[in-house]
Amino acid sequence: MVHDSPERPTPAPKTDLKTDLKARRGSKSDLPQDDLTLDTSDVDPETSAAEEEEDGRLPEAQDDTSEAIAEGTLSVGHAAIENAVRLAPTSPGVYRMLNAGNDVLYVGKAKNVKKRLSSYARANAPLPARILRMIAATTHVEIVSTMTETEALLLEANLIKQLRPRFNVQLRDDKSFPYILITGDHWAPQILKHRGAQSRPGRYFGPFANAGAVNRTITALQRAFLIRSCTDGFFESRSRPCLLYQIKRCSGPCTREIDFPGYGELVREATEFLSGRSHAVKELLAAEMEKASGELEFETAALYRDRLAALSAIQSQQGINPRTVEEADVFAIHQEGGYSCVEVFFFRTGQNWGNRAYFPKAEKTFTPEEVLSSFLAQFYDDKPPPKLILLSHEIEESALLADALSVKAGSKVEVSVPKRGEKKELIGHALTNAREALGRKLADTATQSRLLEGMVTTLGLRHTPKRIEVYDNSHIQGTNAVGAMIVAGPDGFMKNQYRKFNIKSEGLTPGDDYGMMREVLERRFKRLLKPPEGEAAKAKDNDKADDDSFPQWPDLVIIDGGRGQLNAVREIFEKLGLARVSLMAVAKGPERDAGRETLFMPDREAIKLEPRDPVLYFIQRLRDEALRFVIGAHRERRKEGLREVGLAEAPGSGTA
């Protein structure tokens, strides 16, 4: 989908611009601030959206069908619902079932709320065990009336995402999708990845399934159309072309290696390509290549050849590019082992812009159709829908969903289950991906669970850890000291939970690892003990027994170091009263030899595991991931320090 935002007046370009696109050979020059690989692996998760391309977490299996339901509690639930029926309207609306603790158990919508609630109130009605458990836990019902059933559907989806009721299907790990933006507020437009509100003037192309798909496409577009990716500040400060110009990924508008009309033509071609007119753009470039070759301009012909190859590379990376589908989202669901996987493919301007697997939380008794129906309403709660939505299963309220999404989009949206042709093939391809993604996730989760259970046996833990935090710090002779925390759980590394800590204590002796670790852990756990008001309620919710949210409190803390570091951290834990958190230190082997580490735990002898022990290998992975993250954070801080020093030394800068 392509979006235009309001354009501001563009300043006139400077004169004396060169017209050729030929890449000059020159001396080495520095790269723009957004580097060649667009790597974001060391970005602070607290200040930047996570750019991970991993599938969502697999929810805990919910199988309560054998749970006994007391007759007394069921009658109490029926009585509470009957009381609500008396006051319920016969118009459309949304109802919420709540328990004695005022927790929302279920959010539902109905065309006739009174009629729907009456179906729950009948004592002898043949209802599924899941519904009976919900009724038994209900003590009161809240109702919100709406003007239409369409409004009820949209409100229901919004409330489910906000309240996360136990008995609803829940869409989890929902992130905003990235777009490609070609800016419109500068005479030399920039191409970049964009998330969030589309307020900057320019053309937006997307959504793409993940950051990786955007980065690969931008890199290929730079090779094909030579559009700059640097920031406006970097652009204005150039006196000579940067390395991107030397490697033929930019046409050098910053130093007038190309004139304004020539650069505008490149931008127009890139916009045409992203808008779906790729065939016309490739034909034009092929004609220009032949023309240059006929005129013996072989260097120019080679440039056009390279641009054509870059466009072909984009389309080859996209895999399936349908001939008859211009704009659509494709959804396919596969269920196995009590879990559901929904695979989503995005097609815009006739191009495949990536796919993503989701693992919604749902009880085993939900059918694929029920899961998919609830998933779709929540999925489009904060996203613009395309013109066409293709499904692998026929859902009961497809017409209602189409009406609701049409109202949201301001144009007609079609929801269908294709039976033949290319659209059916797209569904088949998505189903295959859903089946394979769920298989991989089940295998990964089983392996991770076995390793966590092995840690219980090997380390003598009280229970299987759901959250493991690993701490490390990095510095150079005490300067630019940074501490870091990485987090792991049953689904592997939880990168959106990573944190870095800039060491702030002024009284620390340079290189005092004990003091640095003390500051990091005190800041981390004091925040947990006294969280801000908004986080306090969230932490309370996460402690509920029936909630599979990732816990805020760690079960096990691992630090890099030996007995000395362990004792220092132990003092902090005792001071803060952290008796329920297990603690372990990992000391490197002689000559830092991997496989010969020593494990230290409070009040126990040192533990030496066999070099090929899977638990030792798992602990090494945790430690190495913490090391990788903290070194990246340290390099970033050191880079900022060097930048500040350079500015301070510049003539005319600094304090007055």
Image (tube, rainbow, N blue to C red):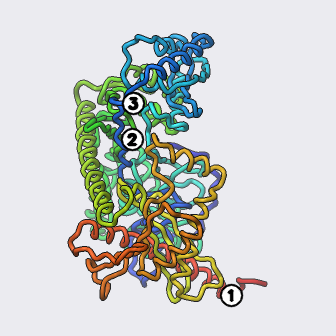
Q: Which corner quadrant of the image does residue 277 belong to?
A: top left
| 264, 458: nearer the viewer | 458
Q: Position of residue 531 (x, y in %)?
A: 62, 56
Q: Are marks 1 and 2 in contact (CB under 8 Å)?
A: no
Where disc 1 sits, the SS reads: loop
Q: Disc 3 or 1, which lies upstream in sequence?
A: 3
* Front in this rendered view, residue 542 or 136: 136
Measure the C-alpha gap from mark 1 to mark 2: 51 Å
Spatial CA span between label 3 and label 1: 59 Å
Residue behind mark 1 = 651
> Pointer 2: residues within 10 angstroms few (<14), some, or many (20+)?
many
Give me the C-alpha separation between circle 3 and circle 2: 10 Å
Q: How many marks?
A: 3
- Please give the residue where the numbered disc 3 appears in the rendered image: 388
Residue 269 visible in rendering: yes
Residue drawn at the location 79% of the way across and 84% of the way down: 656
Q: Is residue 439 left or right of residue 174?
A: left
- Provide residue 377's location: percent of width, then percent of height: 46, 31
618 w.r.t. 399: above or below:
below
Q: Residue furthest front?
A: 603
**Mark before the other along the chain sequence, 3 or 2:** 2
Mark 3 burial class by Cα count in 10 Å: few <14, some 14-19, many 20+? some
Q: Which amino acid, mark 1?
A: Pro
Query: Could you tell me residue 245's position as x and y percent?
Result: 42, 72
Residue 20 in sight here = no
Residue designated by label 2: 348
SS at mark 3 in the image: strand
Residue that lies at the very extreme toward the left in this rendered image:
612
Q: Is residue 327 above or below residue 34?
A: above
Image point 42% across, 33% down: which residue?
Answer: 169
